[in-house]
Amino acid sequence: MDTRRLARASRLAALITAGGVTALVLVPVAVNTVTGGSAPHVLGPYAAWLWPALAALSAVTAGLAAWDPLRALLLRRRPAHPAHRTAALDRVEAFVRERLDGSLAGEVRLKLGVAPRVGPRLPGRVRTALVVLGEPGSGRTTLLLELAERLVAAAREDPLRPVPVVVDLAGWRRTEDLGEWLLRAVADRYGIAPRVARRWLRERELLWLLDDLDELPGADRAECLDRVSALGPTPFVLCATDPGDAWAGLPRREVVRVEPLRREDVLGLVAACAPRLDGLHEALLKNPELADEVRTPLAFGLLALGYRAGRAEYRGIVDTYLVESAARGPGDPERVVRALRFLARVARRRHDLAARTRLPRRGVWLDFVGEAAVWRLFRRAAAGALAGAAVALAAVVGVRLGLVPAAFAAVATILVPRCGFPASGAEDGSPGRGKRWAAVGFAAGAVVVGAVAEAGAWLGGQVARRPAAVVFGLVVVTALVIAYAGTRDRYWAVVCALGPAGVMVLTGPSPGLVAGLGAGLLVGAVAGVFVGGLTAVWAGLGRPAAAGLRWLPVAGLAGAGLAAGIGADVRLAALGPATGLLVGLAVAPLANRPFDPVAELLSRPLALDEFPLRRKALLRAARDRLLLVEGFRFPHAAVRDHLAGCDPVELAATVARRRADLRPGGGSAPRA
C-alpha cells in the first residue's frame, strides 16, 4: 500500500469535510446570529460553542489547505531530502524524452520508420571527463540525450548514482561565473533549487551533460573550455567539434569520436525505407557528389524528409529540405519564409534553436526590419497619429472653451519637440499600404487625444468647484513646477509663474482656465511620452535626432474649423482658457523622455512585415510541414543559419515553382 497516497487522500477528505461544515453550516448560523436572528432549534443547546467551533474548524481548514505548499516549502529548506532527487529525475527524464521525440531523428523515425545510426554507444558510467567529438550534424546531441536517458534509469535504481542534467552552454557568457550560471540553468530547466544543486555539486551527486559548446563565439568557447576543466573532480560529458589541442588541459579525459556515415550506411538506410525513398536511391547512385555529401545523420534526415513525398531536383541538402517541406501546404510561401528567416535570426543571436511565438525585446531584432516598415511607421503612422492628435485637441478645446483657445492649441503644436522622423524608403510596391498606416495612425491619435482632452477638461471643471483661493494657488504652483522643471532656474521659474497669476488677477480663477489647464496637462503628457517613445525607437535604429513637424499647426487649424462647423463660437472671455491650456501643454517637452515600455510597445509594428500577428498559426503550419520540430524549434543550427542568411524572395519563388510542379497537371514533372 502506498502510504503517501493514502495520507494525501485522507487529508483531502478531511479538508472537504471541515470546509463543508464550516462554509455550509457554521458560517450561515454565525451570520444569522450576528444579524439578530437565532441559531436553529436543533443547535440550541450548543449555541455557546458556535464561535469556538467556527474558529477551530476554520483553522483546521486553513491548515489542511496549506499543508502541501508548506510541506513543499519545508522540503526546499532541506536539501538532503530524497524528494528532491525523485523530482529532479522526473523532470530530467521528461525533458530528455521531449527532446528526443521532437528532434529531427524523431521526425525521420516517425515519417520513414527508420532513423540513421548515430555513432558509438557512450559508456553507461561516467567516472571522469568524457568528450564526444564529431562534426556538426553527426548526432552528438542525440547520443548525449540517449546517454541521459540511460543514466536517469540507472540513478532511479541506485541512489548512489549521480543525477544527470543536460545543459546547453550556448547561453553562457565569459563575464559570468560558470558554476553559478550552471546552477541557474538547472534551476530554470529542471526546477532544482540552487541550495540543493550546490549540495549535490559538493557531494558529487550531479553529472553535467554539456552541449552546444560550438554555439559560443571563438573566444568565449576557449574560455568556457578552461572553466569546464576547472570544475574540479566532478565528472562531466561535453559535446563539441574537434578543437585541436584544446583538450590537453583536461586531466583524465576519455574521448569518443563520432565517425561520418559511410556510403554503404546511407544506401542501407535508404533501402530500409523502400519504397518511400526510391527516388533518393536512384539519385545517390547517379550522383556520387550527392552521396559524398550525405556524411551525417543530419544530412540524411534532411535529404530524406525532402524526398519523402516524391522525387525532386537536388539543390543542396538544406535547400532541398526547405523547398520540399515548404512546397507541401497552402499559404503564401514568402510570408512563411520571411517569418522563419526573422525567427532564425533571433534564435541565432540568442544562441539557441527556439522559434519564439512572442517578440523578444527590441534590441534583439530591431536591426532586422526593412526600410519599408520604418518608412510606414515613422513617415505615415506616426505623422498621422500626431496630425489626428492636433485635430482632436483643437476640436475638443474649440467645443469646450471656444475658438480662440482652439487657435492657440493649433499654434502650440509646433512646440512638440523632435516629432519629425525623416525616414527614407519605398512603399515596396504597395502604395495603398502606406495610406492605410496613415489612416490608422490618424484615427488612433484622434481617438486617444480626444478622449484625454475631454477627460482633462472634465477634471478641470471639477477642480474649479473648489474655493477660489485654492484654485488660484493650485494654478500658480502648477505653473511654477512646470517652469522650474523646464528651466532649472528659480528666477525664470518665478517669472513664468507670474504670467498665469496675472491673468487670474484680471479674470479670476475661472472654470475655463482650470479646464484648459487640465486638458493641456493630460494631452501634453501623452504627446510627450509618445514622441519620446518614438525617439527611442528611432535612436535604436541608429538614426540621428529628428526635427519637429512644421505643418502640425495646419492640422490643428483644421480641427478648429471642425469645431466651428460643430457650433463652437468666439467667446470674449478667452484669455483665461488660452493661458491655462498653454501652461498645461508646456509639460510636453518635460514628458518627452525615452520610456522603455513605451518604446517597446511602439516598436512592435515594425516587425509585422516579417512576423505577422497570427504567429502561432504560422508556426503550427511550419511545424506541420516539418520546417520546425516539436516545441517550435529549428531542427538543427545548420537549418537555422541557412534560413537566417537566405534571400526570402528567391527561396519563396523556388517554393512556388516546386508547388506548381506538385499540382496535378503542373508545368513540369519532378525529376531526380
Image (cartoon, rainbow, N blue to C red):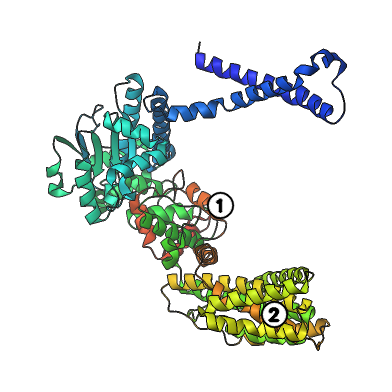
Q: Residue drawn at (54%, 65%), measured in percent from left and top?
A: 598
Of labels 1 and 2, earlier in sequence is 2
Q: Name the residue under label 2.
A: 580
Q: What residue type is labelled 1?
A: Ala
Q: Nearer the viewer, residue 463 or 80?
A: 463
Residue 593 percent location from the top left of the image: 51, 71
Q: What residue type is labelled 2?
A: Gly
Q: Is mark 2 on a helix, strand or loop?
A: helix
- Location of residue 22 by image quarter: top right
Mark 1 → mark 2, Cα distance in angstroms: 51 Å
Query: Seen from this angle, which residue lies furthest top?
Result: 1
Residue 102 percent location from the top left of the image: 42, 40
Q: Residue drawn at (27%, 28%), measured in percent from left and top?
A: 203
Note whether residue 434 is visible: no
Tally the marks. 2
Q: Which of 633 and 247 is in front in this view?
A: 247
Q: Nearer the viewer, residue 664 or 147?
A: 147
Question: Does 71 sit above or below residue 659?
Answer: above
Q: How crowded is mark 2: few (under 14 residues within 10 Å), some or many (20 or more)?
A: many
Q: How crowded is mark 1: few (under 14 residues within 10 Å), some or many (20 or more)?
A: few
Q: What element carries label 1?
A: helix
In the picture, measured across the screen, residue 617 lies left or right of residue 241, that is right
Q: Mark 1 points at which residue?
A: 617
- Location of residue 140 by image quarter: top left
Residue 551 percent location from the top left of the image: 60, 87
Residue 150 percent location from the top left of the image: 32, 27
In the picture, measured across the screen, residue 77 lies left or right of residue 505, that is left
Question: Does 9 sit above or below residue 615?
Answer: above
